[in-house]
Amino acid sequence: MLDDFVVRSTLGGLAVALAASPLGCFVVWRKMSYYGDATSHSAILGISLSLYFSISIFLGVFLMALLASLVVTLFVNRYYSADTILGVFSHSTLAFGLIAVNVLPAQNVNIESYLFGQLLAVTKIDLVYIWGGAITILGLILFRWKKLLISTVSEDLTIASGLNPKWEQWILNLGLAILVAVAVKVVGILLVTAMMIIPPAAARPLVRQPVAMVLISTVFGCLSVILGLLVSLYIDTPTGPSIISVAATIFILSWIGVLLYRGTRLTMIIKPDKT
Amino acid sequence: MSLVKFNGVGFSHQDKLVVQDVSFTVERGIFLTIVGPNGSGKTTILKLIIGAYNPTKGTITRDADLRIGYVPQKLNVNDTIPIDVNCFLNLGQKFPSKKIRSIAEETGITHLMKVPLLSLSGGQTQRVLYARALLAEPNLLIMDEATQGMDAEGEERFYRLVNDYRARTNCAIILVSHEMHVVSSFSNWVICLNGHICCQGEPSLIFEDEKFVELFGKFPQNELAYYPHKHDHSHDVV
């Protein structure tokens, strides 16, 4: 079964969607989406270095992403806000990474396959890494769900409950680094953030509870992967961008639905049903 | 043993001295009000008590059995997260629904349980925050200008609720307030803060203290001017 590349791609894509949507909810709630960008841009440097030292790309990208979050956390001080440091780090590592790809004597690297992913070329070994990473992320979120949630709602209340909000920040940093590492092959560096942000953003206007947002965004994420793959296979479009385009379409449909619903409620208020 | 004891506590933030040489004790059943001008370090003292800040000088000792309920000045909720009152009350810890119901009734928020947190009014938010603080069965309840957004009547009701709870459970209350009539009718201990402790004592004595009068004017005055903002006096700290 795993010999069929369609099955492998579907499994790889679904794993990323299952981990990216719950993590993405926290990224959206904590307004960390730019953080995701910085982590993923640093991945290009991680890729060049892992090719040079011939270590696994997953490991290289993971370590680089973790380094990114470490540097950002340590450098946020009274001179710089987080978004400045993220801007410095994200674009510097992107620049150094692109130079490294050209300078380091690695055999003809197709950089585009890392920028936009190559889901259809996912191997069985890749699947082991991707599912391992996805399950780790889900485990982290499930295991610390309550603490993550309270620290996201209010830092003051977290501290008053005797918890240290910094721990939860690090849990999310770790999750983000793992996700970037496993998603490089699936949607590529440039679209990892989209995979995290768009499904939760599409779910947001439909829900009133955090759990509901996580569940619905996960459904949206999986739907995007399956439909995106189908589109990519039948009309031969690049896979990563197809998945994200489907997610974006779901986002638009979700808002159209919400606006229509509000519209009908509005007309009901203006013209009450007298039956 | 007292619940919390400050011994010569000082705190600096970014090389700036916020409070210095603060010593006081919090006993069980106390209704302590901290008064002081804006920027006098009132919120800093509260954050030192809950442990959000560590003192840069002196020591803070806490009873091993200290359970703090904290009602913040306002809730800095992330406006991006969908959450209703019921879910908010259960944040961080799951409480039996029977307990939630009884505390919701006591604080008058039963009808708000399914309402999104962000669509509450100021007064409703404060009552929800108070209910949340009570769920932990605190023996120290800390409130930072907890009645923002309430009218005078609501405020009176709110503090009566708090005071009833104190009478029933012997819970200590620490309150930061600008409302002198609250101080006079409920507190049994007042700390007057302006970077350091200007004076502390029972309300009736404090209102006569010349340092208090210097900072806030004479109390009680006429009923319309509870809190004259006399911020023109200076100290050698801060």
Image (tube, coloured by chain):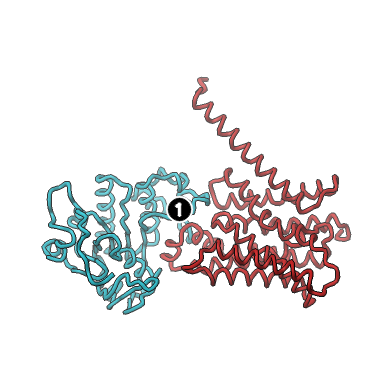
Chain colours: A red, B cyan
Residue A263's spot in the image, x, y percent? 56, 31
Three-letter code, disc 1: Ser
Q: Furthest residue to the top?
A: A275
- Residue at 32% x, 68% y is B45
Left or right, A161 with reference to A106: left
Q: Is residue B198 left or right of residue A256?
A: left
Return the residue at label 1.
Answer: B97
Q: Residue at x 34, y 74 (%)?
A: B62
Q: Which is more toward the observer, B193 or A171? A: B193
Q: For the residue labelled by badge 1, is the local secondary structure a helix, a strand or a loop?
A: helix
Whether residue A142 is visible to the viewer of this picture, yes or no, is no
- What percent of the width, then of the height, locates residue B181? 19, 53
Query: Relative to residue B106, is residue A74 drawn left or right?
Result: right
Q: Chain of mark 1?
A: B
Picture quarter with the N terminus of chain A: bottom right
The image quarter in which residue A52 lies: bottom right
